[in-house]
Amino acid sequence: MRRMIACLSMVLLLSSCDWLHQVLPGGSHRLSPDEFKDRAREVAVRWQDSADDRAWRKGFIALERLNQQGWNHVDRIPAWVSTSSDNGAWQLAAKLPANSPDRADVRWPDGEVSQVPLISAASAYAEFSKPADFIEDECPAEGCRPLRVTDARLGRVPLETSRGTIQAPAWMFTVEGVEQKQVHVAVAPSAVTARPERMQGGTGEVMAFDLVTGKPNELLLEYGYGACDTIHGARAYETDQLVVVDVDEEGASSGARCPAILKLDTITVRLTRPLGDRLVLDSGTGLPVLRGLHRR
C-alpha cells in the first residue's frame, strides 16, 4: 500500500515531528543540570508503578501496526497484486473455517505464556478485503485482477512488542495465482493495550540505546539533533526501576539560519551501576527507549 510519510519519528513511539522544533531558529532550549534533574524526576514519578508501566512490562503493547503490510514478503508480490489489493478486488472462493479456536497461547521472550482472544477468519477477511482509504477511482482494467481466496489457516508471524518479539497468531490466506500468503494477525483488539502517550513540555531526541561491550556501566544512545545544534554530552537520572536519559543539546541562536535537517549520531552515557532490568526512558517524551540501534 502506498503511503505518504510526513516526518521521521525521533523515538519509535513518537508520532509528531518534534525534531523540527530543534532545527528551526530559536526552537531549542538547553536544560541546565538542575532543570534536567527536575524534568527527569517528573518523568520517573509519572511512569514508575503506573498503568503504562504495568502494561509495558506485563501486557500486550504492539510496537508496529498489527497488519501494516498484509502480505508476507511484501517485496516479492507482483505489482498487479498490490494494485488489486488496494482496490479491494477480493473474491471469496472457499468456505472459511467456522470452528477455529477463540483463544491462543502467546509465549513471551522471558518464557512467560499468556492466552489471548482471537478473531475469526471471516472477521479477518472482512477487515483486509476493504478498498484502501485513499482509493477514489474504480480499479483500472489493465491493472487489477480478482484476488480469489481459496484457503485460510491459522499460523504465526513475528510481531515486535514492548516485551520483545513474539510469534503472534495470524490467519494465513491462500490466494489463487499468488505465491505469498495474505497475512492478518488474529489477536483480538481487546487484548492489545494502546501505546502510552507522551508527556508535554519536552522534545524527543533519544531514539534507541544499546549496551556497550566490556563497559557494563555505560549505555550507547542513538539520538537526533539539528544541523546547527551543539552537543555537550549525555546525562542520566537513575532510580531502582528506571533510567531517564537526555542528550545535552544547545540550539542555534534565534538569528541563525539553519536548514531543517535531522542529523543522527550516537553518544555514550555513564550510569552508577549496570542497567540490569531497568527501563530506559527519554526525558523529553517520557516514553520508553527501545534497545537496538538503527530502528528507523
Image: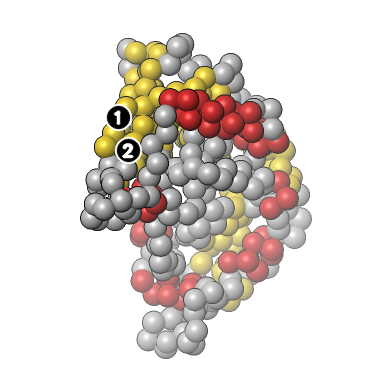
- Considering the image in quadrants, where does the N terminus appear? bottom left
**Residue 5 horizontal side relative to residue 58, left or right:** left
Q: Are marks 2 and 1 in contact (CB under 8 Å)?
A: yes
Of the image marks 2 and 1, the number of the one nearer the N terminus: 1
User: Where does label 2 land, which residue?
Assistant: 250
Q: Is residue 293 above or below residue 216?
A: below
Percent x, y of residue 60:
64, 40
Whether residue 164 is visible here, answered yes or no, is no
Q: CA distance from mark 2 to mark 1?
A: 7 Å
The three-letter code of the residue at mark 1 reads His
Who's the residue at 56% across and 61% down the image? 173
Q: Relative to 154, is 119 on the left or the right?
A: right
Q: Regarding mark 1 in the picture, which secondary structure is present there? A: strand
Residue 266: quadrant of the picture: top left
Q: Label 2 is placed on what type of residue?
A: Glu
Residue 193 x/y as whole percent: 67, 45
What mark, if any, has residue 232 been given in the picture?
1
Neighbour tally class for label 1: few under 14, some 14-19, many 20 plus, Cα within 10 Å:
few
